[in-house]
Amino acid sequence: MHRLFVAIRLPQSVRAHLLAMMGGVSGARWQAEDQLHLTLRFIGDVDRHQAADVDAALASSLQPPFEIALAGAGTFEHRGQPAILWAGVAPQAPLKILHKKIDQAIVRAGLEADGRAYHPHITLARLPRGAGPIGHFLEAGGALSGPSFPVDEFCLYESSLTPAGPIYTIVERYRLG
């Protein structure tokens, strides 16, 4: 089985900017540089044949390149407790269009549509119960911004779960345009 997701690989300069702001929250499990990406669609576990169908369908997803920039930070909660620290991006409209096209391609490959609302973000840290206060981080992250960067491709990733954390490997790249 292959555990797959579709994401945008961030430019090195953006990853460096995000790495520089990480810290200051005790107990947070911060993402490593090679884990920083902007997820477009989580697929999950598929067999080799389904993976090939997903690859073929994604190759037909057409959209012109666009630009986005870092914009703010926030959290996702689980049972009323902050569970994920994330960096936002703007504008979100082209990402939501690309997400919809990718979701449609994955449905054409025989998998179910993504029923969740899409909130474009870059996961920075996972927060276990008992993690330190996040107010200072969110206050500083609320002003998070950076120069725009081009999005001219997206990638199909495989996620291998290990005791040390997930390892993300790019399986295929798809050019926009």
Image (cartoon, grey):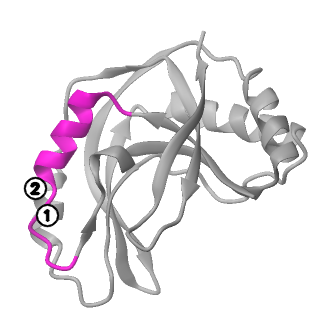
Please tell me in which quadrant of the rendered image residue 82 appears.
Answer: bottom left
Q: Quadrant of the C terminus?
A: top right
> Which segment is the magenta one?
10-27
Residue 146, percent from left and from top: 19, 31
Q: Determine whether 11 is above or below 128 in the image.
A: above
Residue 137 marker: 1
Residue 140 marker: 2
Question: Residue drawn 73% across and 41% down?
Answer: 103
Q: Is residue 87 left or right of residue 145?
A: right
Asked whether the residues under the numbered discs 2 and 1 touch, taking CB atoms below 8 Å apart as contact, a structural biologist would say yes
* Residue kind at label 2, given as amino acid type: Ala
Residue 170, percent from left and from top: 53, 37
Residue 17 marker: none
Q: Determine whether 60 is above or below 58 in the image.
A: above
Question: Residue drawn 90% across and 46% down?
Answer: 110
Q: Is residue 4 left or right of residue 168?
A: right
Label 2: which secondary element = helix
Q: Quadrant of the N terminus?
A: bottom right
